[in-house]
Amino acid sequence: MASETVKEKNTEYEYKLKPAGLDRDLVIKSAEGIFSPRRADKGTEAMLRECRFEKTDNVLDLGCGAGIVGITAAIYGSKVTMVDIDPAAVNYSALNVSANLSPAESARISLLVSDAFENITETGFTKILSNPPYHTDFSVARRFIEGAFSHLCVGGVLYMVTKRLEWYKNKLSSVFGGVKVKEAGDGYFVFRAEKRGGTPYNANKSHSHVKFRSVPDGTDPSGALDFVLNAFQKSLAPVWTEEGINTFNNLIDHARILPVFRYFEAYDDVRGKTVGILAADNTLSHLSLLFVDAAYRSRGIGKRLVELLERESSSIGLSVNAEPSALPFYLKLRFHPVNPGPEGSGVIDEKDGIRSVKLYKKIKHDKNKWQVITPAANADDRT
């Protein structure tokens, strides 16, 4: 699919593209704030290369933006519903439908303003395609995936494209029972999940299976930092001072820009979500952040994340500036106060509104005995 910007009018843009396999160019009008404004998004192009539309298809373009996906499907003869939460996006889609399709092709399209599936009453779609807003938290994507399952026919397929791999792979697998992933270049991954039955795969799963991993260097840290910030706001922010909250927020903002941390993740592969994040400095000698989802505490997840850090570290020891409420947790893991103080439990320091106790432990590098099997039952993972 070739894409070329043709002209610009203030905040309105017009560009030309030719979807792969079509015998015509499309001329798309868009504007600032409408996805995508200046040219066809490379992720959308990648998703369209992986999807084949048929005349028998009933297609949902979920989050249609300027309408490229829905228009392409209609040219192939599919029945199409195009929806977006933004009325302006739906208006631009309607404009582009009229400009690029014949009356017969346009008649196959319905346009609707809807927040995800809120206003969509039709079910039985054979294909749903979406390029979700992956620069936000995962709440939008979660609604898209769970809603897509309930609105597809059995045998129907959901196509999604994002630059984030693990969360989407886990979530789609947990709902659909499996997912195919294709690396599409430019950092994009195209996901294909087929609905094989009437009940989501995880609907009858009362348990969860938490797995642990070291996040590869170079991975976009946004997902990990979003999780940390959300956990912080729910657990510590309500009892911290405004100065401390600002200091913490500035730390997270700094970490989004510079690679100051290396990350370790605990995720529930049944429910398809991150449940714990540990961030350490680049030398793996200082534990900088540790947060566990409130619903998953007292299951040893924080303990396992610390063990994973110890295993990966080549340092002789590990330090942490522990939030005072987390002190019992770290003492159980054999951390010791650097400055014990008169009571031996550690002196509380305060800097820039953040109170902490400096702790340290020696690392035993006995890798043959280290393993993660079943989380313990008595760990307090607050930090």
Image: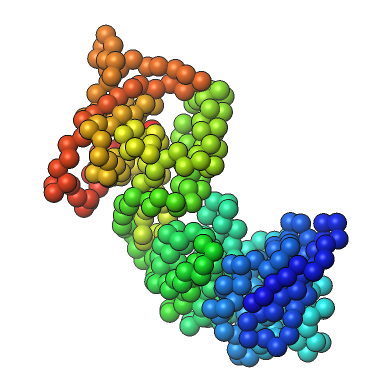
Decide which of 52, 256 is in the foreground and name it: 256
Q: Quadrant of the C terminus?
A: top left
Q: Residue 5: percent from the left, percent from the top?
A: 76, 67
Residue 107 in view = no
Say which residue appears at 43% left-offset and 64% top-offset. Answer: 169
Say which residue appears at 33% left-offset and 57% top-offset. Answer: 208
- How many numbered markers are drawn? 0
Q: Residue 181: percent from the left, percent from the top?
A: 44, 71
Q: Quadrant of the N terminus?
A: bottom right
| Vertical comparison of 270 with 315: above or below | below
Can you name the residue that lies furthest to the right here?
Answer: 9
Q: Residue 188: percent from the left, percent from the top?
A: 52, 64
- Left or right of 43, for residue 234: left
Say which residue appears at 78% left-offset and 65% top-offset. Answer: 30
Say which residue appears at 81% left-offset and 87% top-offset. Answer: 103
Decide which of 284, 136 is in the foreground and name it: 284
Can you name the residue that lies furthest to the top here?
Answer: 342
- Left or right of 115, for residue 361: left
Q: Residue 19: percent from the left, percent from the top?
A: 66, 79
Which picture quadrant has residue 284? Answer: top left
Decide which of 203, 280 is in the foreground and name it: 280
- Left or right of 100, for residue 383: left
Decide which of 339, 260 is in the foreground and name it: 260
Residue 221 in view = yes
| Vertical comparison of 268 with 299: above or below | below
| Vertical comparison of 382 with 376: above or below | above
| Vertical comparison of 264 with 160: above or below | above
